[in-house]
Amino acid sequence: MAPPRPPPGGAERAARGQPTQATLTSDYVETLNVLVSLLENSRPDLRGHSALTARLVRKVSDRMGLSPAQVAGNVVAAYLHDIGKAGTYHLTALNVAEYEGHRAAAHKVFNVPERFLQGVQLSSDTKTAVNGMYERFDGKGFPLGLAGKDIPLGARILAVADAYADLTQNPRNPARRMLNAGEAIQFLSKHKGTIFDPTVLDLFRAEVSGDDLRAKILADRHTVLLVDTDPEDTTVLELKLLEAGFDVRIARTMPQALHELRAREIAIVISEIDLEVADAGLTLRSTATAEAAGQNVMVWVIHTRKTDRQLAEIVFELGVDDLVSKPSPPDVFVTKVRQLVERKRSRAPASAAAPRGVSGSLAEMALPDVVQILWHGRKTCTVKIKTSKGTGDIGFVDGQIVDARLPPHRGEEAFYRMLNLKEGDFQIDPQAIPTGKTIDQSPEGLLLEGMRRLDEGLI
């Protein structure tokens, strides 16, 4: 009699079309993201907070080389850390340390997420991260008064990520305004070695610096605000806009849309007319126009199922740039939006229309990362590289690499050799438009071939 077969491994399950553990974990985390986001929607100060915290926790956990199980446990903790804490205060480690009212509230609810989810088999990494996020590095926290490395690593990471997300998203944070990345890190650094683990904070600073540089590189990437109550309509359009190189924000109601306009720089608004109430989209336009936030909007488009002559007259009296009837092919609609943007930019003063250059260190951001950002951002520019061994440049047109020079080499060979540069500086010049074309290969193909050559020691 043949012995029983052992349970199939991940590779065998994948071959059979069955979900692997990695797939199940990913699905589980994505489900958490959706559920927690729905819970946070009722509080403008917390909307998207747990998702941002989870992204930050994942980045730092990955950077530290933690196992997939530890990373997953920490990420789940980031999604769950505010469950059951929907009181007056937002209870971050920083807020709890700074304010007695926050501290008293946190003492009562620090383990509520675990209690709420007793029926769920949470990992030990998730439990210790959530329960230990109010411990302090100097031992003056709670519930156990742990200090230094006795505090679970997941809790130390979560404490920094949660406080950073609060400082950059919530105007009611201890700084009393939303801070940019550099300001938030500087604010947290005041508590280095007291509230926060110095090593985790330094690593976090390095990760955020990379994000800040990415944001600068994509600074002229326009942000679109989609205002519509229909998730199906907005999802299809959102994907097409992302593919076209836009950043996208979503609002379902007029108050949400006004919050987005006041909180960030929105270049394009695409709004339905009927939102939570009839004609709220028109009220949104008139309200925004009367505020400073609305003055920054370059293009405003009404995208609606309502069509009548009188409506068109009202819309254009409000100064809307275009009125588009639903349904409209997403590709055609996005092309129209891009044309409107280009038309507005061409009419702007040269000083206002000119995009800014960005410079950085190859030690701060590796060249492959720069290439991927410019590729996905569909940028047209020249990346100029200066090292102790000489200078080179890479030309981009709409995100595609068209030329590369590293004397005496040019074309693909020059590009591959530049991938081997670890030290030096780069400057992204949006005014230097490439004129020659020596490369036809896609950026993805160039990066894959370059990585192969590096691995095999060919360059």
Image (tube, rainbow, N blue to C red):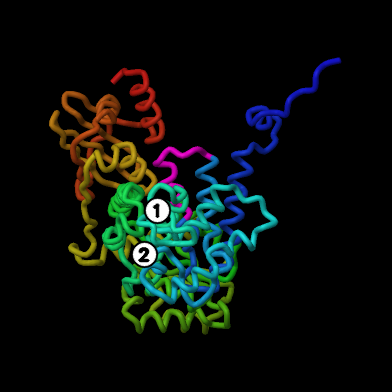
- Spot the residue most to the right: 1
Locate residue 401 relative to residue 44 in the image: left or right: left
In primary-sequence order, the first of circles 1 and 2 is 1
| Image spot of residue 387 (x, y percent) | 16, 34
Can you identify the residue that label 2 sits on? 168
Residue 58 shown in magenta = yes
Quadrant for the C terminus in the image: top left
Image disc number at residue 147: 1
Residue at image position (57%, 71%) is: 229
Quadrant for the N terminus in the image: top right
Residue at image position (43%, 79%) is: 285
Residue 132 shown in magenta = no
| Image spot of residue 236 (x, y percent) | 56, 57
- Principal SS element in the magenta part? helix
Give the camera-side residue of 250 and 103: 103
How much space separates mark 1 and mark 2, taking CA atoms?
27 Å
Residue range corresponding to the magenta coloring: 54-68
Q: Residues within 10 Å of mark 1 (few under 14, many from 20)?
A: some
Amino acid type at circle 2 is Thr
Locate residue 143 relative to residue 412 in the image: left or right: right
Q: Which of label 1 and label 2 is nearer to you? A: 1
Residue at image position (36%, 64%) is: 168
Locate residue 296 relative to residue 73 in the image: left or right: left
Amino acid type at circle 1 is Ala
Q: Is residue 314 above or below residue 392?
A: below
Callout 1: SS: loop
Give the camera-side residue of 251 and 303: 251
